[in-house]
Amino acid sequence: MSISTRSFEAITDAFHRASGIRLGDAKRQLVVGRLQKLARDRGMDNLDLYVQSVVQGGDSDELVRVVDKLTTNETYFFREPAHFDFLGELLDSGSLKSPGRGVDLRFWSAASSSGEEAYSIAMLMADKVGRSGWQVVGTDLSTAMVRACERALYPLDRTQHMPPNYLKQFCLRGEGAYDGHLLIKRELRARTRFVPANLMQPLPDIGEFDVIFLRNVLIYFDPDSKQDIVQRVMQRLRPGGYLLTGHAESINGQQLGLRMLRPAIYQR
Ligand SMILES: C[S@@+](CC[C@H](N)C(=O)[O-])C[C@H]1O[C@@H](n2cnc3c(N)ncnc32)[C@H](O)[C@@H]1O
């Protein structure tokens, strides 16, 4: 299938309005590849007609499906291990502890994709702190990703960077139809919660956090949107809390009142 320039602009504009992410002409083949499956599911083999039905037809349910398809969800357990090493050091040295008796330490995986980042944090916390005293919240723009996070079922090949004892301690190996998969154990799932949230819009009521993972999402935004997102996210960081960004992403920490401690690690 192919797409006309007009339809490409119409669908990427609609995607930009929904997500804040601008897909330029270089992404044309990617857009065609991802949309053709959606068009076929609707019995259409013409992408221009499909785009017309979504955009001009104002089909908001189908637009959610388009947004889910066009976002890039690549992730894996313990990605960018320097962040998990840093967190481990903070916990071992006692510099990261509950702000008060009976108050949980709170972590936010702010573009959680399918949940590997949030469950990596949960595994580290369960290992270092135990089964209580902390919570992890994961949010993502894509509702399909939020459902995947809640399912907590993953192919075993995403665990290459997971410490082997964590695989044993915190995951159940799938059998039969789930062969080659793992399920995150219930005790970790009980301390994690996932909700849809668009970082470009006012955030849902998810509270404040001690550590925020805002990784591998800023890369998709123009400088102004990036600045807006970091400012919005920062309002949810407790004073003294830590903001972690992807190592390929850069933010002007000083301007935002953040102290850079190490590459991609900032403290409020
Ligand atoms: C590459 S994944 C990053 C996953 C994880 N943080 C990591 O570093 O491995 C990027 C995620 O950002 C999400 N995303 C894109 N735009 C967003 C927005 N405006 N608001 C919230 N999430 C967004 C996508 O749905 C996708 O799941």
Image (spheres, grey):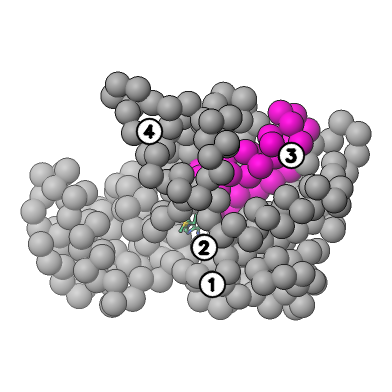
C-alpha separation, residue under disc 1 versus residue under disc 4: 30 Å
Which callout, 2 or 1, points at the residue further toward the start of the chain? 2
Instruction: Say if residue 3 shows up in the picture.
Output: yes
C-alpha separation, residue under disc 3 versus residue under disc 2: 26 Å
Q: Nearer the viewer, residue 69 or 119?
A: 119
Asked if labels 1 and 2 touch by Cβ distance under 8 angstroms, the answer is yes
Question: Is residue 3 left or right of 104 when viewed as pictured?
Answer: left
**Does the beta carbon of the residue at mark 3 sit less than 8 Å from ligand 1?**
no
Which callout, 1 or 3, points at the residue further toward the start of the chain? 3
State the residue position of label 3.
128
Which callout, 4 or 3, points at the residue further toward the start of the chain? 3
Residue type highlighted by circle 3: Lys
The N terminus: image quadrant: bottom left
Q: What element does badge 4 sit on?
A: strand
State the residue position of label 1.
248
The boundaries of the magenta stretch are 106-134
At 8% across and 53% down in the image, what residue appears? 45
C-alpha separation, residue under disc 4 versus residue under disc 3: 25 Å
Q: Specify the farthest residue to the right.
A: 101
At 32% across and 53% down in the image, what residue appears? 69
C-alpha separation, residue under disc 2 versus residue under disc 1: 8 Å
Asked if labels 2 and 3 touch by Cβ distance under 8 angstroms, the answer is no
Number of the front mark, 1 or 3: 3
Residue type highlighted by circle 1: Ala
Number of callouts: 4
Answer few, some or many: residues within 10 Å of disc 2's Cα (few below 14, many 20 plus, some between 14 and 19).
some
